[in-house]
Structure formats: C-alpha cells, structure tokens
Image (cartoon, rainbow, N blue to C red):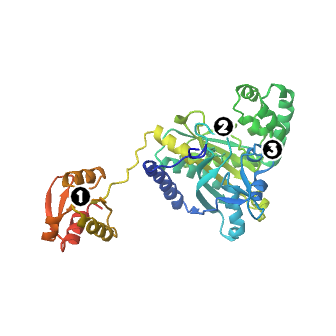
Amino acid sequence: MKLQAVKGTFDILPDAQPYWHHLYSAAERVLTRAGVRELTPPVFEHSDVFVKSAGASSDLVVQKEMYTFTDAGERSLTLRPEFTPGVLRAFVEHGMYTLPAPVKLWCKGPIFRAEKPQRGRFRQFHQVDCEFLGLASPLVDAEAVTLLYRVLGACGLKNLTVRLGSVGDPEDARAYNSYLRDELGKRATELSEMSRERLRLNPMRVLDAKDEGDQKIVGTLKRPLDFLNDEARAHFGAVQRFLTDWEVPFEIDDSVVRGLDYYRRTAFEIHHAGIGAQSALGGGGRYDGLVESLGGPATPGVGWAFGVERVLDAMEQDGVEVPRSPGPTLFLVPMDDEAISEVAKLASELRSSLSVHHAYSRRNPGKGLRDADRSGARFAGLRGERERERGVYTFKNLRSGEQHEVSEADLKTFLGARLKDVR
Ligand code: AMP
C-alpha cells in the first residue's frame, strides 16, 4: 500500500509556513495587547470533558464527529473537536476562577472532527480560540467580537462582515423552541432528514439548515429576536452600542445560532466575501453553565474560534502579501575536499549570529556560486587550495557582484561590519 496522509488531513509544507506564522503572530500581537494570555491545553482529554459540555443535542455528539478511542488503561479519550471544553477544564483545575475577572485566554492548534472531507472541511484542521471568563457584562461580549474582528484585520483581511444575533436566555430559547416545535411540527414531512433530527433534539438548529426547501420554510417563521425578554434585549442593545462606538461594523442577523446547547444571549459569526459556501471564518457567543458542568463554580463566559485554513484561504483571495523567509546571509562553497570540513566548521561557528548555509561536497566556483544564488544568499564565501595557502576566503557579494579576499583573522570583523546592516 502506498502510504499517504490520512483523508481529511494535510501537510503544511515549508513554502506555506510564512502564511501560518503571519497569521499566528497577528493573533498573538492583537490578543496580547488586549491582555489575553495564551494557554495550551492537551490535544486529547477524557471524553467526558467534551460529552458533558457539548450537550446531548450537539452535532459533535449526535453525528458522532468526535475521534474517541479507548487507551490501554481502558480510559475513554477524545481528540479535541473544539477548544472551549479543554480550556474550561484547565480553568477549573487550576483554580483560575480566583483571578480577577474577566480571565482572558487564547489558544491555537489542531482540532479533530470526523466529518466528511470537502473543500474547506477537514478532519484535522486548526483553530485560534479565545475565551473571556467571569463577567456577564455586555462590555465583554463587545470586546470579544471586536478582538475577533481585529485579529482577522491584522491578518490583512478586508471584506469582513460581522453578523450579530442573540438567542436570549434559556427561558426565551425554550419558548422559541416550543414555538418552532409547533410550527415546524406541522410541516415536518416537508423537512430534510437532518432538520427533522434537529427538530427533535434542538429545534433552533433548524434555522442553520443548508437545505433550500428547509430555508424556504424557515423564512416564514418568527425569529429568536422576537422572543427576547427585556433584560436580554437590553444586553443585546448594549453590545450593539459598544460596537458602534468602537467602529466595528456589524449587521444584525438573527439566523446566527450556534451549534452547541450552552449558548445564551449574544451569538456572532464573522464571514468573508471571497471563500464561497463555507463563508464563515469563525464565530462564537456567550455561554453559561459550562464551567459548572465541568465541576467549577457558576461562571459566565464568552468565547470564539476561527478556522485557520479558512482564514488562509481568505487571505489568498484578498491577495495578502506575506514576507517570504529570507535566504541565508552567507553561503559557503568548498572547492576541494579539505575545504568541506573547514566550511562546515566555520558555518557552525557563524550560526551563533548569522544564517549560514554551505555545500556538502566540493564544487567548482561556477556551480558553487549558482548554488549560493539559488539559496537566496546575500554573500558567497569560497574556499579552495589557493585560499588555504593564503589564509583567506574569497567573498562575493551576490547582489553587486563585487568580489575580494578576506583573511581568516579578519573574517569575523569583516562579516560583522558588512552584515550588521543586512541581518
Ligand atoms: P465551530 O467550532 O464549528 O463554530 O467552527 C469555527 C470555525 O472553525 C468555522 O467557522 C470554520 O472556519 C472552522 N471549521 C469548522 N469545522 C471545520 C473543518 N471541518 N475543517 C476546516 N475548518 C473548520
């Protein structure tokens, strides 16, 4: 059998790395400035962490999208299908609820879901995730939305749309769900199979249906916002006022409901015009009860996550330019056998302060300089019998073509003087 990457997974090749670095460093810059601290949870957890927090009706559980396995110690473990539960497990385990609120945490890394692979949908993909714990104030919802918008802006994206909705408090959601059960129940035979299943488990998720027939039916219904109680309505209003005040553009979209049961009040998504059907780059919302379900004290929270692959796709659509990794400062060319170990030793010394590559076998000067050029180096240093006799290296500036000898004794000073303005 020819071994290949598992379906739904992919390699991030060296040429792609600068884009990933660009994205992660933009996230780190924006979030760190806002006092959000990085936490790295393990890739797998006890399955209970995800099962307890996801709620019985979530897609992850219902559609068996979790990679769950039993280890040699008969423990049921799961590769994380999202960050939030693991972060909250860590929050509880390390007693972070005693820290001044809000406790702001972010993480990055791979996520695993056993979904059907298609464009923009993988089985191992990556997310940047952010959680704000401990305050119920709309100020925190607005800060969360703003930081999501700013991180993606810092990645170089334009054409971003924030869609903002509210699912109200649990009693509003209950009232709305029972309204949906009544209305959709009457037309259940016209719904797709997936929507019928959602209708049974969590009717609000039918609003998310991709099926056109379902969407036609959904279009005739009242919306979650029609069911908000006064406090939830005031909260939603306050979030909007902060966002307007902070010049974060958004549109109200009351079809934004999140896939998991624990969301309440604010729900949001961020979309990009260029990436087709899967246009959601990320989303999030306010949740409640999640920290308790993991054994901690009652703690309100807001969180979001975005998909790194989708954002990279959007960056490509927007023509975002990312600095390429530069070639080495110096490329050393051994021109006889004795020089091979000489240049390797010199490279190893110089690497404490410079990026230095070299050829691993003897080269004639023409071929050696071509290798140096191809590596993207700024300078080439040639060493052969003639140089050894004179105790020098022949240096060539690969941009200007200027060439001269430098004695071994002067080598470091020469490089220091010539290269400090380079790197
Ligand atoms: P979710 O945690 O389902 O709200 O997803 C948040 C974001 O992660 C989505 O908006 C996508 O950008 C990304 N995402 C979710 N599932 C996948 C997947 N299977 N493959 C790639 N990206 C995904």
Q: Are marks 2 and 3 in contact (CB under 8 Å)?
A: no
Q: Nearer the viewer, residue 69 or 415?
A: 69
Amino acid type shown at disc 1:
Phe
Name the quadrant of the C terminus: bottom left
Residue position marked by numbered label 1 in the rendering: 379
Within 10 Å of disc 2 (Cα), the crowding (few <14, some 14-19, many 20+) is some
Please tell me which residue is depicted at 25% across the width and 56% down the height of the picture.
378
Name the quadrant of the N terminus: top right
Residue position marked by numbered label 3 in the rendering: 172
Please tell me which residue is depicted at 68% across the width and 51% down the height of the picture.
81
Within 10 Å of disc 1 (Cα), the crowding (few <14, some 14-19, many 20+) is many
The mark closer to the camera, 2 or 1, is: 1
Which of pointers 2 and 1 lies earlier in the amino acid sequence? 2
Q: Quadrant of residue 300?
A: bottom right
Q: Quadrant of residue 95?
A: bottom right
Q: Nearer the viewer, residue 96 or 371?
A: 371
Residue position marked by numbered label 2 in the rendering: 253
- Residue 333 in the image: x percent, y percent? 24, 59
How far apart are the alpha carbons under marks 2 and 3?
17 Å
Amino acid type shown at disc 3:
Asp
The answer to whether residue 319 is left or right of residue 70 is left
Amino acid type shown at disc 2:
Asp
Give the SS element for disc 2.
loop
- Number of marks drawn: 3
Q: Is residue 5 visible?
A: yes
The answer to whether residue 4 is left or right of residue 65 is left
Give the SS element for disc 3.
helix
Q: Quadrant of residue 348?
A: bottom left
